[in-house]
Amino acid sequence: MGNLIWPFSQLPLLHPKPPKSPNPPTATMFKPCPLLLHRHGHRHLKHLSTTTTTTTTTTRVPLDLPLSHPTFLVWASNTSLGKTLVSAGLAASCLLSKSHSTPRKFLYLKPIQTGFPSDSDSSFVFRKLSHLSLRRHPVFPLFSSNHVLKASVPAANAVLGQGNAENCESGIRNLRWYEERRVEGEGASAAASELVCKTLYAWREAVSPHLVAQRESAVVEDAAVLRELLKCLRVEFEGGGDERKEMDVFCVVETAGGVASPGPSGSLQCDLYRPLRLPAILVGDGRLGGISGTISAYESLKLRGYDVVAVVFEDHGLVNEVPLLSYLRNRVPVHVLPPIPKDLSNDLMEWFDESCGVFDCLKEKMLSAYSERIKRLHDMPKKAREIFWWPFTQHKLVPEGAVTVIDSRYGENFGIFKGQNNGFITQQFDACASWWTQGPDATLQTELARDMGYAAARFGHVMFPENVYEPVLKCAELLLEGVGKGWASRTYFSDNGSTAIEIALKMAFRKFSFDHGILSEDNTAGKSVELMVLALKGSYHGDTLGAMEAQAPSSYTGFLQQPWYTGRGLFLDPPTVYMCNGVWNLSLPEGLYFGNPKLENIAFSSRDEIFHKIRDNSDLAEIYSSYISQQLSQYSGSGGFNHIGALIFEPVILAAGGMHMVDPLFQRVLVNECRNKRIPVIFDEVFTGFWRVGTETAADLLCCVPDIACFGKLMTGGTVPLAATLATNAVFTSFIGDSKLKALLHGHSYSGHAMGCTAAVKSIKWFKDPQTNLNITSEGRSLRELWDEDLVRQISSIHAVQRVVALGTLCALELRAEGCNAGYGSLYASSLLQKLREDGVYTRPLGNVIYLMCGPCTPPEICSQLLVKLHTRLEEFCQIKEFTKF
């Protein structure tokens, strides 16, 4: 009860070129199997109706995943459940059917293999398909090959002989082991179907990959596994002559062990393969206890954003498919294979024959899912333009080809669908931090999904006034112990930054009225009293009506956008600081010069000097104080009707106004002047809060605290909307009285919702913990420098760049432009942004202002890569603009 404010309550009352295809495949190209449950023909089943950790290694690898052919991950709920049998059965269905009119290709990839060479899943598929081909006599010949690309030294020695693989780096040898076989078909065709089996990495001992990798001194990082896998896909999908390119290709990538079995780096395999987000086939467990294991595996995949296309398992006579179908609610088909015989004397040939119908149906379901996905991805831009009304977007300027199709997000990277040549998924770093909200790396993303699922399952949503529940209490306590430490005593929850500002304005105006005797005994004020704000030009506090009144005239507040806008405030033009030609400079507005030559060409030796408290004793501080006092004097006379009832500003960075960095000394003096006049101070930290500018709160940079502060965006890690307005106890007590009408009568249906508060608790703790955020300095009060200072200086020295601001997770620049090329409506940067997206950097400008934004956990080397790409494209941009002048 001591730190929450309840609404309406009174207290104590890189791109490869995929094969060309004129049209994307559609669902009509493959006839899907309509059954949700498909069984072998052993017995008739009646009554089939259904009723209603470990921290992972974050993978950063260039992702260009071709979608020209269907590719699926084969998972299992545990080890030894028959993943390889399923892979072999699918290969037989694809390659050995007598109904095929053209030869086909099946690609079997096994990225991680232990127990090699005595246990080799790729060899199993290779042998079984050769034997099945001899048995079934397909129309086309079958050319099969089996490859083992890399192996640990012990595994390589087992194949090549002792001592032949001792001298290799990192314990992994390029093995390049190979075998092949050709089985003739019934027809006279020279063209052959093709089976390609590849093991990417092999280890000798038959134990879990993370154990054998350690024991054989052959640890392989996740990024290396993914690179090798993508390389194989590109080679097999895009290599060869025109005839091979036109072949129907089907690919399965078989995992090792269970869904959550560790890979060779120690990462869970469900995390290892997540950057690719390939659709999944789950091999379940038909044994006693198998229902639970299968559901757990399914949930682990769904939690990480995988699409599970089908579940398949061996029949053990327990009818596990019925409860599974009930649980899955007919969303995912279940395929049941006949029991595997204990007598393997016939090499499972009869079992494969008996399973043929199940594998055919499974294959058709997979092909149908692939076709539907490709069609959906191709259709999305057109449908989006027909039914969406995007915010801050002129639709006339967005052709269909300019719509970005985001298939998924993994950590800080988008998986972007590109429709050329039947499509591929490419990776782009989200340099907008998804509109300034994002902070999670891939590991935190999974943690948030898990914790929010728990909150949804435990609470759903419960109303907040006069109630308490664990997530909202924990969140309020963390806020007051963190961003509100030392000044705030109360937390008021809302649903977004703009509404948090509305609440803050109501709080501030009540506090001002309370302190200055404006309220009468019946809690009303004279009709002639008008309360205004003191704010900064270029500021932005949101799009709700009250928030817009608290900001100066701008592109966001004109008659076109808000005909009711009047601008109820005194709006000061702030001094700003920026880097140009490698030097931090101070830019003063005209009203602050006063003809003083000392105020011209003020520069700083470093960015740290800008924030130093020693500046409080400078002549400039006195000039700021006099200027602010003079501006306020016109509203402070006794008996006046207009009062400055609140100071509101974005500390340090004016975000939507163009990423301007305000002189912190000016804002600090502003706070002091308003305190002297008992004007409540509001910090709008919706953008700057939670490490966006390098500290948990921008108040730490200003070295002063507010009476009220607003937070949002990064507070939940960018996963779900939630905002909070923090206030001092003095602000809170101005709402206390005997009547409910004196309470703060403001609220939202989802105030303090459990899912948002749960996400906030996880994110707040994660960002400030040095164990999870390696960017936290040893003192724990700031982030280490994320943007390479030399690169930032080089960018600031490019002729096309007018100014640069680099602070915390933000690096912004303004392009030198005039007339219609300058300002929020400018399209001047369009060509530059397109080039950056081609480089794998997703950006969205503020007119001629371009910014890069990362998360609090982003490694500095990633930021350096972004800066290098930006520098290269800026130099090209500059050369093009210079050339077009002549």
Image (cartoon, grey):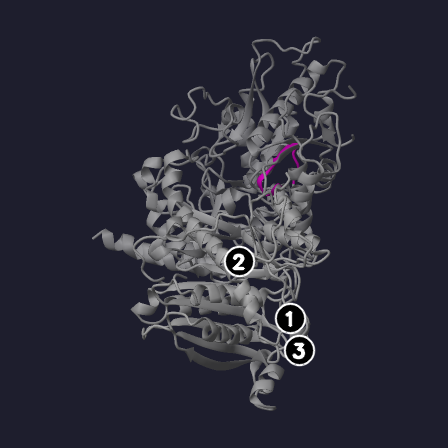
Mark 1 vs mark 2, foreground winner is 2
Queried whether the magenta region covers residue 706, the answer comes back as: yes
Disc 3 element: loop
Expressed as whole percent of the image width and height from the top left, the position of residue 153 reads 60, 83
Q: Secondary structure at mark 2?
A: helix
The answer to whether residue 33 is left or right of residue 397 is right
- Label 3 crowding class (10 Å Cα cut-off): few <14, some 14-19, many 20+? many
Q: Which residues are magenta?
A: 704-715
Residue under the point 31% across and 71% down: 241
Left-right relation of 318 to 668: right
Q: State left or right for residue 457 relative to residue 389.
A: right
| Residue 858 in sight | no
**Could you tell me which secondary element the residue under label 1 belongs to?**
helix
Q: Which residue is mark 1?
A: 209
Q: Tell me if mark 2 has few (under 14), some (14-19) or many (20+) residues whose alpha carbon lies within 10 angstroms of its own.
A: many
In depth, the one of 274 and 42 nearer the eye is 42
The residue under the point 53% across, 20% down is 634
Q: Amino acid at mark 2?
A: Val
Residue identifier under label 3:
205
Give above or below for 753 relative to 94: above
> Which of the two labelled residues, at mark 1 and mark 2, occupies the earlier sequence position?
1
